[in-house]
Image (cartoon, rainbow, N blue to C red):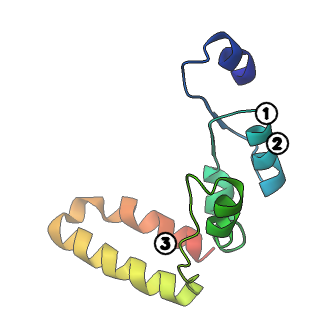
Amino acid sequence: FAYRLMKDLPHLTFTVNGAIDSYSKIDQHFDRGINGVMVGRMAMNNPWSFLGPLDHYLSLKMPHIFPFSGVRCLTPKQVVHEYLDYVYEEISSDPSHTKLILTPLFQLLH
């Protein structure tokens, strides 16, 4: 459906979502001309194996948009430590968002 809309409305930007659970599926969508993909469930369910190489993948596929930053990949332990620093700052200023802010952390430990 999104691809039909892209042809009918070429001046708009289209992003697809749903059942995108591999880099090859991302490739398929980009090869067909889609502007963006959302990988929420895959990222939440497999953060280390899916998101770890994402920076490198995007820099190869779209170097004009995502130039390789050369940034080191953090270990899971480093990510958790950095995220906890962020959580502490956020809940110190507004404790009402504690559950919302901690949810991604629980997924990382899944």
Of the two numbered discs 1 and 3 on the same chain, state the one appearing first in sequence.
1
Query: Which mark lies nearer to you, 2 or 3?
Result: 2
Around disc 3, counting alpha carbons within 10 Å, would you say few (fewer than 14), some (14 to 19), or many (20 or more)?
some
- In this picture, residue 26 sits left or right of residue 17: right
- Residue hosting label 3: 105
Residue 37 picture location, percent across and down: 64, 43
Residue 22 shows in the view: no
Quarter-of-image position of residue 19: top right
In the image, what residue type sits under mark 1? Arg
Element under label 2? Answer: helix
In the image, what residue type sits under mark 2? Gln
Q: Nearer the viewer, residue 58 or 23?
A: 58
> Taking 38 as reference, is 33 above or below it?
above
Of the two numbered discs 2 and 3 on the same chain, state the one appearing first in sequence.
2
Q: Which mark is residue 78?
A: none
Query: Which mark lies nearer to you, 1 or 3?
Result: 1
Q: Disc 1 vs disc 3: Cβ atoms closer than 8 Å?
A: no
> Taking 74 as reference, is 23 above or below it?
above
- Residue hosting label 1: 32
Quarter-of-image position of residue 33: top right
Residue under the image location 74 percent in, 22 percent down? 3
Q: Which mark is residue 28?
A: 2
C-alpha span from label 1 to label 2: 6 Å
Q: Disc 2 vs disc 3: Cβ atoms closer than 8 Å?
A: no
Residue 52 picture location, percent across and down: 65, 73
Element under label 1? Answer: loop
C-alpha span from label 1 to label 3: 34 Å
In the image, what residue type sits under mark 3? Leu
> Taking 43 as reference, is 27 above or below it?
above
Q: Nearer the viewer, residue 31 or 104?
A: 31
